[in-house]
């Protein structure tokens, strides 16, 4: 509450081709460098493995600003792992999420004196959801969404969030449709979220829209995004989270919510017993549900 937004930058390029993420990263370096130069921060705090994140790290390093990195030392099944390790090498201070990540950062050559195993900060939000009663959240009135509004009955609902796998762009159409087919065949009411801004999101979103038009009378509601606490409360009261978001591995594990992890996007991540790993196969996904 002591911080407030003092500067906004707009650098995202529509992810329509293979150069879009690199161009966004380049524009972000330019804009964030101007921010650093003007505001002269005492410390730059950056997180995880996004292509936006590497921009903040590069700009800080070349301007000799102390850089702290959260959630380094983890492995994943796509380009994000390379970005995460690059952030680690650029950073001066490291706040990792688990013991394996702690050891991996040290093996990358970082000084153990500046590596701290502090856990995953996003679990602080999950703790609020789990430990106290929040005001009743209605996903149909507190979100930007379309679709059929169904009864949030005792039978429960699914939450689906699947991002593009940047390592297999040519398979995105088949990958998303296998998931949507499993959801359709399950007959379980579902909240479907739109993907992030990674390469291939336009193809993935197109298939979701096509599915929506064909199944407009089904108990499926489509949401653009939610505030983190609202999203976690929605998941907390669901049957399971379905897709390839890291939320299924981190927050769902803490909340005790089953997660069906589809494909290789989270390959190599440290997982809890709440996670079932499946391939992009509709029958396998349906069995997991």
Image (tube, helix red, strand yellow):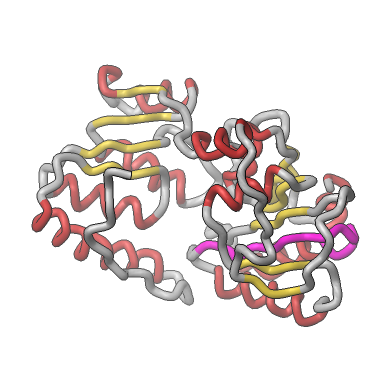
Q: Tell me residue 148's x, y (percent).
A: 79, 72
Extreme residue in the top direction: 113
Q: Tell me residue 56's x, y (percent).
A: 26, 52
- Quarter of the N terminus within the rendering: top left
At 15% from the left and 46% from the top, the residue drawn is: 41
At 26% from the left and 23% from the top, the residue drawn is: 114
Question: What is the number of callouts on the image?
Answer: 0
Q: Is residue 117 magenta?
A: no
Q: Tell me residue 118's x, y (percent).
A: 41, 25
Q: Is residue 188 magenta?
A: yes
Q: Is residue 216 above or below residue 131?
A: below
Residue 242 showing in the rendered view: yes
Residue 265 showing in the rendered view: no
Closer to the camera in the image, 54 or 43: 43
At 64% from the left and 77% from the top, the residue drawn is: 206
Closer to the camera in the image, 71 or 170: 71
At 25% from the left and 40% from the top, the residue drawn is: 90
Residue 236 shown left or right of residue 202 in the figure = right
Residue 50 shown left or right of residue 235 in the figure = left
Residue 94 shown left or right of residue 229 in the figure = left
Residue 141 shown left or right of residue 35 in the figure = right
Closer to the camera in the image, 158 or 53: 158
Extreme residue in the front direction: 135
Q: Is residue 106 above or below residue 239?
A: above
Q: Which residues are magenta?
A: 183-196
Q: Is residue 222 above or below residue 137?
A: below
Q: Tell me residue 95's x, y (percent).
A: 36, 30
């Amino acid at each position: 509450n002591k911080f407030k937004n003092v500067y906004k930058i707009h650098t995202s390029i529509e992810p329509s081709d293979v150069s879009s993420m690199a161009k966004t990263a380049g524009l972000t370096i330019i804009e964030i460098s101007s921010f650093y130069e003007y505001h002269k921060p005492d410390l730059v705090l950056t997180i995880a493995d996004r292509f936006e994140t590497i921009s903040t790290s590069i700009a800080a390093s070349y301007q000799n600003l102390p850089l702290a990195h959260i959630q380094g030392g983890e492995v994943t099944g796509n380009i994000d792992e390379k970005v995460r390790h690059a952030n680690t090498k650029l950073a001066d201070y490291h706040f990792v999420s688990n013991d394996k990540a702690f050891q991996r950062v040290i093996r990358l050559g970082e000084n153990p004196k500046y590596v701290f195993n502090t856990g995953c900060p996003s679990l602080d939000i999950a703790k609020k959801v789990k430990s106290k009663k929040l005001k009743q959240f209605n996903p149909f009135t507190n979100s930007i969404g379309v679709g059929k509004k169904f009864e949030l009955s005792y039978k429960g609902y699914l939450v689906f969030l699947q991002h593009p796998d940047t390592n297999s762009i040519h398979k995105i159409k088949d990958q998303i449709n296998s998931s949507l087919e499993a959801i359709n065949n399950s007959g379980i009411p579902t909240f479907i979220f739109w993907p992030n801004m990674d390469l291939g999101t336009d193809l993935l979103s197109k298939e979701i829209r096509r599915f929506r038009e064909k199944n407009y009378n089904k108990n499926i509601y489509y949401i653009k995004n939610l505030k983190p606490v609202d999203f976690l409360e929605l998941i907390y009261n669901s049957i399971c989270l379905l897709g390839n978001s890291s939320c299924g591995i981190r927050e769902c594990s803490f909340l005790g919510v089953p997660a069906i992890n589809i494909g290789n996007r989270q390959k190599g991540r440290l997982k809890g017993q709440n996670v079932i790993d499946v391939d992009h196969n509709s029958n396998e996904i349906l069995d997991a549900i």
